[in-house]
Image (spheres, rainbow, N blue to C red):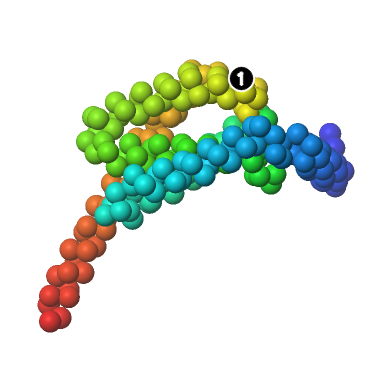
Amino acid sequence: MLREEVGIEELKRVHKELTELRHEFWLQHDLFSAQWWLLLAVLVISWYVWWRLVDKRKLMEIVLYGVMMSYLIFIWDQLGYELNLWLYSRKLFRVIPQAESLDWGILPILHMLVFQYFRSWRSYILVNIVMAAVMAFVYEPLSIGIGIYSMLNWEYVYSFPLYVAKAAIIKRLVEAVARKQGRSDGTNSRLNARAE
C-alpha cells in the first residue's frame, strides 16, 4: 500500500504527464483536422438554427430547460469519462474533456426544440424515444466511425434509456420551477394589489 504522500506525488506526476500528452495530441491531431472543423460547424450551425427556430415569447423557459439539460449532459459525460466508459477521441477545445459540440450544442438544442414543439407529456416522451433511438443507434456508431467517439466499457443499448430519462427529468424539473414561479407570481400579485 502506498503512503499518502507518495500516492499524491505519483498522482501529480501522472496528471502532469497526461496533461502534456493531451496538449500535444490536440495540437498535432485535433486542431484543424477534418473532425475539428466538423465539430466547429456542428456547434455554430446548431446554435444558429436554434436561434432561428426558438419561440422568443417562451425564451426564458426554453433557455432554463436548455441550461439544465446541458448541465445534466455535461455531468453524464464527465462521469462516463472518469469511469472509463467512453472517450472523445477528437476535441474542439483542448481543455474540455467532453464533446463540446454535443454537450453544449446539438443535444441540448434538439431537446429544447422538442420541449418547445411537443408540450404534452405523451408527445414529448414519444418524440424523445425516437430521438434516443437515433442518437444511440445511429449518431453514436457514426461518431465512432468518423473517429470522434470511442466506447471503452459501454454499449449503444445502455445509452438509449439514459437519453429518454434525462429528457423526462429535465421536463419535470422545469415544470416544477414554472409551478413554483406561478405560485410566487400569484402571491406577489396579491401583495401588490393589497399595497395599492
Q: Position of residue 66 (x, y in %)?
A: 41, 46
Residue at horizontal 69%, vertical 46%? Answer: 95
Residue 81: image quadrant is top right
The residue identified by callout 1 is 145
**Quadrant in which the N terminus is drawn:** top right
Whether 122 is drawn above or below 155: the answer is below
Q: Position of residue 46 (x, y in %)?
A: 46, 41
Q: What element carries label 1?
A: helix
Q: Which residue is drawn at 43% across and 22% down?
A: 134
Residue 59 versus residue 194: which sits nearer the camera? 59
Q: How many labels does the image show?
A: 1
- How packed mark 1 is, by other alpha carbons closer than 10 Å (few <14, some 14-19, many 20 or more), is few
Position of the C terminus, as image quadrant, is bottom left
Identified by mark 1, the residue type is Gly
Residue sitting farthest toward the bottom? 196
- Identify which residue is drawn at 79% across, 37% down: 28
Q: Can residue 29 be seen in this view?
A: yes
140 sits left or right of 52 in the view: right
